[in-house]
Image: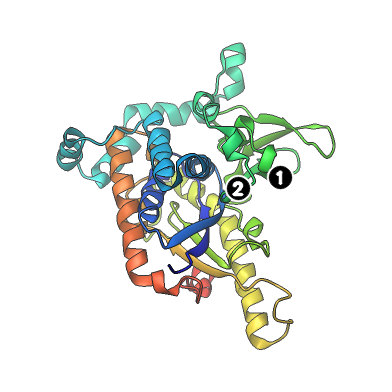
Amino acid sequence: MAKPIRINLALQGGGAHGAFTWGVLDRLLDDEDIEIAGISGTSAGAMNGAAFKSGWLEGGRDGARANLDWLWQQLGALQETPMTAWLLAFAPSTAFLGRAMEYSVGSALADAAARFSSPYALGPFYDNPLRTVAERFHYDAVCAADGPRLFIGATSVHSGKIRIFTGDDITPDAILASACLPTLFQAVEIENPDTGKTEAFWDGGYTGNPALFPLFDPDLPDDILIVSINPLERSEVPITPQQIHNRINEISFNSSLLRELRAIGFVKRLLAAGNIKPGSMKDVLVHMIADDALMTELSVATKLSPGPVLLGRLKSAGRAAADAFLAAHKSDLGKRATLNLQAMYD
């Protein structure tokens, strides 16, 4: 039996759009030739990574798939049945759903409230709605030394720097910190074991969406497969308040990833030119699974609206995108990069 192809996953955050990553992971689990060695995740990517790892350790591929299904059912997805397949088939198009949510009265009111109020205004009545989900992960498996190495990123409110949680540092609060949008949630406070001081954290997407550098560890494979759920390009100039806010969000949450890709490209050019000694720095092989055509039909409003039809559509799109990637590039894994880095940041 051939040795499995070991790769790392870099899972972007993006609220409900993380259901696309659910579909990608579901498809990758079908392929027994592929083994996941490391996962770096932010926000929804952190939750997907925690569900994947704990399920994998408790039940292998079937366990990981079941745990991901459980996670997204908690977040609003319907259990797959013939009836839900019928519902998905006859529901309005994804583009229509995206526009309807973006321009709905509820979305407008929520957007206005986020701009003119603070989650701290709720005082003692505040509660993070994701806590009940985050607390139900099996942390003995999430933090275990066995299985894929898991890295979760969050942004320090005080320093503006990224903090990577791994091993026993991964707690419900670490996952909530990684997904803490400051207009919706109060900052998550976590003690720093090195200093003994309590630090406040916001969403990891501001400093690493996701962070790639933890996956440069020499013990991890060279291949990094990025699952992208924030479109890099939009052809039209945003003109409405909703469109402008949405594009600002996308640019902000892609900037850290583009910086790391530029750094990887720089190192690869130095290695190719012989300017640095081979083996002194890792020659990373970068790949990406994305569906920008679908994601440009969506917006901030759909990120915050985990309706069952939308989640089901996103999961199906993720499976299809992963299937297309494997058909085109599975033979490249472990051998060569398939993402044109220069085209990404030029």
For residue 288, what is the image quadrant? Answer: bottom left
Frontmost residue, 103 versus 70 = 70
Please tell me whether mark 1 sits on a helix, a strand or a loop.
Answer: loop
Packing grade of label 2 (10 A; few <14, some 14-19, many >=20) is few
Tally of numbered discs: 2
Q: Earlier in the sequence, mark 2 or mark 1?
A: 2
User: CA separation, marks 2 and 1?
Assistant: 31 Å
Q: Residue furthest front?
A: 1
Above or below, 267 relative to 86: below
Q: Give percent across and percent down for residue 102.
A: 34, 38
Q: Residue furthest bottom?
A: 273
Q: Which residue is mark 1?
A: 160
Q: Give percent across and percent down for residue 122.
A: 57, 16
Q: Give percent across and percent down for residue 339.
A: 47, 70
Q: Which mark identifies residue 146? A: 2
Task: Report if residue 300 is visible in the image.
Answer: no
Q: Residue at x 46, y 55 (%)?
A: 227
Q: Answer left or right for 136 relative to 73.
A: right
**What is the three-letter code of the residue carrying label 2?**
Asp
